Amino acid sequence: MTLELIPLCTATVSLAETINVSSTFLIGEVTGIRLEGERLHASMKGHAAADWLRVSPEGYGTLDVKVTVETDDGAVIHATYTGRLQFDTMTVYATPLFHTGDERYAWLNRIQAVAKGTFTPEGTLIYEMYELR
């Protein structure tokens, strides 16, 4: 069996200063997101978006992210993803799932995406996102 990686988009994520709840639990509020790809162009809708990050003493974090975006042509899409943040390299590995009621983007409801993200020196998180086939 072979897996294909079909390019989905580049996601550029802006984050607020981290809220440190405890030594093992952080909240990273998402202040903006832009998705740019051949099939998907969207920006964050509303303000309810964050990563509820569990921190492991072994040097990684477990992601729990929820965000809503609106496409440039008006479709609303909710995305959730889990994954890992490797603190030694500040690399993020994620598995996004999407939900929308807009028929133009119903194909997103059926796919499994994967993403790898890195931080810029300014603190912006940039993901390269792919559809798995």
Image: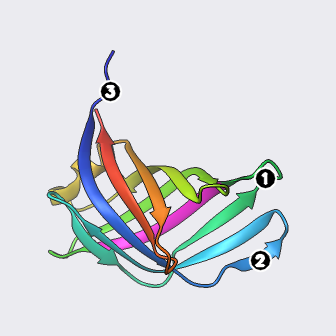
**Residue 40 percent coordinates (x, y):** 21, 62
The region drawn magenta spans 62-70
The residue under label 3 is which amino acid type?
Answer: Leu
Q: Can you give x and y, in whole percent of width and height, for residue 63 in the image?
A: 61, 57
**Residue at the spot x=42%, y=61% of the render?**
79
For the point 27% across and 58% down, the residue is 9
Rendered image: mark on residue 20: 2
Query: Which kind of residue does numbered mark 2 sit on?
Result: Asn
Q: What element carries label 1?
A: loop
For the residue pair 42 and 85, the one nearer the viewer reads as 85
Above/below status of 66 relative to 21? above
Colour scheme used in the picture?
Answer: rainbow
Image coords of residue 64 (percent x, y)? 60, 58
Label 3 crowd bin: few (<14), some (14–19), many (20+), radius 10 Å: few
Q: Residue 56 carries which label?
A: 1
Say whether disc 1 or disc 2 marks the residue closer to the N-terminus: 2
1 or 3: tag closer to the N-terminus: 3
In the image, residue 132 lies in the stretch drawn in magenta: no
Q: Main secondary structure of the magenta part?
A: strand
Q: Position of residue 71 (x, y in %)?
A: 23, 72
Amino acid carrying label 1: it is Ser
Q: What element carries label 3?
A: loop
Quadrant holding the N terminus = top left
Q: Are marks 3 and 2 in contact (CB under 8 Å)?
A: no
User: Badge 3 is on which residue?
Assistant: 3
Which image quarter: residue 85? bottom right
Q: Residues within 10 Å of mark 1 (few under 14, many from 20)?
A: few
